[in-house]
Image (cartoon, helix red, strand yellow):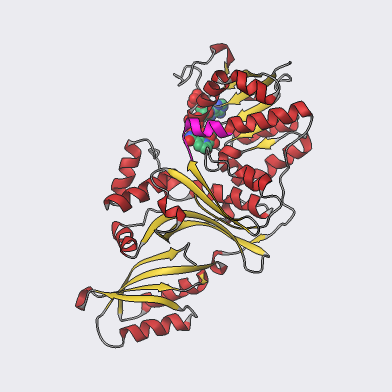
Amino acid sequence: MKPLKVALLGCGVVGSQVIRLMHEQAGDLAARVGAPLELAGVAVRRLGRKRDVDVDPALLTTDAEALVTRDDVDIVIEVIGGIEPARSLIVSALSRGKSVVTANKALLAADGATLHEAARTGRGDLYFEASVAGAIPLLRPLRESLAGDHVKRVLGIVNGTTNYILDKMDSTGASFTDALEEAQTLGYAEADPTADVEGFDAAAKAAILAGLAFHSRVRAEEVHREGITDITATDVASAKAMGYVIKLLAICARSDDGRSFGVRVHPAMIPRSHPLAGVREAYNAVFVEAESAGQLMFYGKGAGGAPTASAVLGDLVAVGRNRLAGTRGPEESTYADLAVHPMGDTVTRCHVALDVADKPGVLARVAELFAKHDVSIQTVRQEGHGDDAQLVIVTHRATDAALTATMEGLRELDIVRAVASVMRVEGDE
Ligand SMILES: NC(=O)c1ccc[n+]([C@@H]2O[C@H](COP(=O)([O-])OP(=O)(O)OC[C@H]3O[C@@H](n4cnc5c(N)ncnc54)[C@H](OP(=O)(O)O)[C@@H]3O)[C@@H](O)[C@H]2O)c1
């Protein structure tokens, strides 16, 4: 059988594991695809760099464009990352009718439309399972298995670095800075952790998930994003005392009328009894709620060379089979064309801790302010007395705009010395 020729762009953490697995599992992969998979070339930035895998030096090139446009190449795997040159290379390959497998969430979330359009006109496949939650099969279930259902909500932990940091803060009482330092020492966080701790990485994944779940096009810039850098050991301890744990969540949820959806990434308190609360260390987990299927949970390793390469190889087998059968996988589905609603319209709940003067009438004035903004209070608790008095309030569901206006009002009340912490509450409605 004529082999399918594969061009690999990038030979770093993921690319080197793709080469290893293609080599070690060559026989099984050939049997599953129906033809051998042959590495046609490997594009890198630095030819002389030491690699984590043995690569035939004759396959290495710095001319990625020449590699993807070679007539004999059938499939291109892009694991370079970033926007350019990845976008131009993928478009070059797709417009020549080749199939592409990519793990590049940043590019898909910034400009997925260009890639999908190139796949449509070139009549090749564009598969990207590894771009969200690494090894966890999540995009294919959304794209295919749930194609007959109506997804209402996707709620998940999609960034292992921040989950590791928050988990350490929760289990050891460490500060954000100390937990980040530990994550960096252990290789869970990059030297520049901005993309993870400020929520950019999770926001790109949320955009991809929302697009698939709601059959609409979503760009990263439409995702409401808050990171975890302001979370203190006190926030974590206070959540713990109330039976909650703080997680960085990606949440994509249809509005009640089904005409729009919200997509957001922010830290939130979830009850310790929620399945996502048990997701420890650098693991990822995503909870999907669909009308007929009900609640589904996907859990596993969200990053790392081998786990991510597993997802890449799964896609490689799928696009290989499609090529041999002369068919294609599903195209981008954006027919619903729902709008992303602003964060202010999102319905959520809030936990707020107020440093207040311990004197008669304080509670009444605080309650009056909540009522003014139509935010109803679920629980209120006073901790300490005198100068140390703190009111801890958990609200019922309200729009984020009403909650934000309430917090602003509280900051202006003379009886409130400080709004010590504000955190959204999810997962127990
Ligand atoms: N690492 C993970 O756990 C993980 C998980 C899920 C998704 N992903 C995604 O997978 C992709 C790759 O991540 P990674 O961690 O493997 O990155 P990486 O270790 O930094 O590797 C990037 C590779 O791309 C090569 N490269 C960079 N610029 C290039 C250019 N202009 N032309 C040709 N080659 C170029 C580099 O060459 P040199 O080796 O010569 O420098 C390197 O081999 C990213 O999109 C990332 O978001 C990664």
At horizontal 62% and vertical 23% (from top left) the residue drawn is: 29
Q: Where 283 falls versus 383 (above or below)?
A: above
Q: Position of residue 105 (x, y in %)?
A: 57, 42
At horizontal 64% and vertical 60% (from top left) the residue drawn is: 291
Magenta stretch encompasses residue 306: yes
Residue 83 seen by the camera: no
Magenta stretch encompasses residue 94: no
Q: Position of residue 92 (x, y in %)?
A: 70, 31
Task: Tell me where the magenta segment starts and ends, as one range.
Answer: 302-311
Q: Position of residue 176 (x, y in %)?
A: 32, 51
Q: Where 44 falls versus 355 (above or below)?
A: above
Residue 141 seen by the camera: yes
Query: Which residue reaches farthest front?
Result: 293
Q: Would you say 213 lies left or right of 397 here? A: right
Pick the residue in front: 369 or 349.
349
Q: Position of residue 286 (x, y in %)?
A: 52, 50
Q: Where 87 falls versus 17 (above or below)?
A: below
Q: Quadrant of residue 259?
A: bottom right
Q: Quadrant of residue 315?
A: top right
